[in-house]
Image (tube, rainbow, N blue to C red):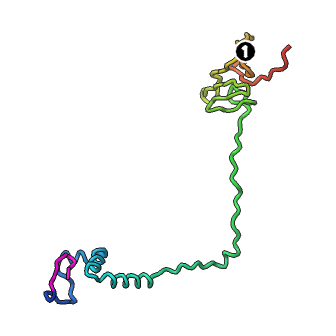
């Protein structure tokens, strides 16, 4: 026989007693389920251990039946409305920019249908005209308050306190 502390005892050199073990290793290892299981299997008592283990598992088998409550049959599932994407609202004016016809292309960047890019810069709480980009014909004309710039379908005109940037639809040329 082999003890929990791996001492092998010959036949007749030991007797069974009901007292607690006095070997420190045996006391510590007696609480280790894996070591006890290993000891049973090492002494060819594995089949008995397996049988006992299966009996114990059967006795504590959980009840897996689903019991419906009477209220379950009455309750109707909640139908939630489908989520909607928030509508993107563009203000009519953004500082010096009249946004009608422009499409936002990033923070402070707007694009006209004709491909003109207008860059606005935040100045305090207001947005101010900063830059106009266009790969095409640009016309600059002197007006009373400064210069009017026309690039593609966008017109930049001076005002008393800055500029006004808007899409200027061109009529037929004469």
Q: From the top left corner, tell me how far across and down residue 112 is, in percent.
A: 71, 27
Q: Quadrant of residue 96?
A: top right
Look at the picture and state if 152 lies above or below 124. Answer: above
Q: Which residue is mark 1?
A: 148
Location of the C terminus by quadrant is top right
Query: Where does the N terminus fall, quadrant-wise?
Result: bottom left
Q: Residue at x 69, y 59 (%)?
A: 80
Q: Of all residues shown, which one is farthest toward the left?
A: 13
Q: Is residue 6 magenta?
A: yes
**Majority SS type along the magenta span:** loop
- Residue 31 shows in the view: no
Quarter where residue 13 is shown: bottom left
As rendered, which of 71 and 20 lies closer to the eye?
A: 20
Magenta residues span: 1-10
Q: Magenta stretch: residue 72 in it?
A: no
Q: Is residue 28 above or below residue 124?
A: below
Between 89 and 115, which is closer to the camera in this rendering?
A: 115
Instruction: Judge from the rendering whether residue 32 lies leftward or rightward of residue 169; answer left or right.
Output: left
Q: Image point 74% across, 11% down: which residue?
A: 143
Q: Position of residue 132 (x, y in %)?
A: 66, 21
Q: Is residue 30 above or below residue 153?
A: below
């Amino acid at each position: 026989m082999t003890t929990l502390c791996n001492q092998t005892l010959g036949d007749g050199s030991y007797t069974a007693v009901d007292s607690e073990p006095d070997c420190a290793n045996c006391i510590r290892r007696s609480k280790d389920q894996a070591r006890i299981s290993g000891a049973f299997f090492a002494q060819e008592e594995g089949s008995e251990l397996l049988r006992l283990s299966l009996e114990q598992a059967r006795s504590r088998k959980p009840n897996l039946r689903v019991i419906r409550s009477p209220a379950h049959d009455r309750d109707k599932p909640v139908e939630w409305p489908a989520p909607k994407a928030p509508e993107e609202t563009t203000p009519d004016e953004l500082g010096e920019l009249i946004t009608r016809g422009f499409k936002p292309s990033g923070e402070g960047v707007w694009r006209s249908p004709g491909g003109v890019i207008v860059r606005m810069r935040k100045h305090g709480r207001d947005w101010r005209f900063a830059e106009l980009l266009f790969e095409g014909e640009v016309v600059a004309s002197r007006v009373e308050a400064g210069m009017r710039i026309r690039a593609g379908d966008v017109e930049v005109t001076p005002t008393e306190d800055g500029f006004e940037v808007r899409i200027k639809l061109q009529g037929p040329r004469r």
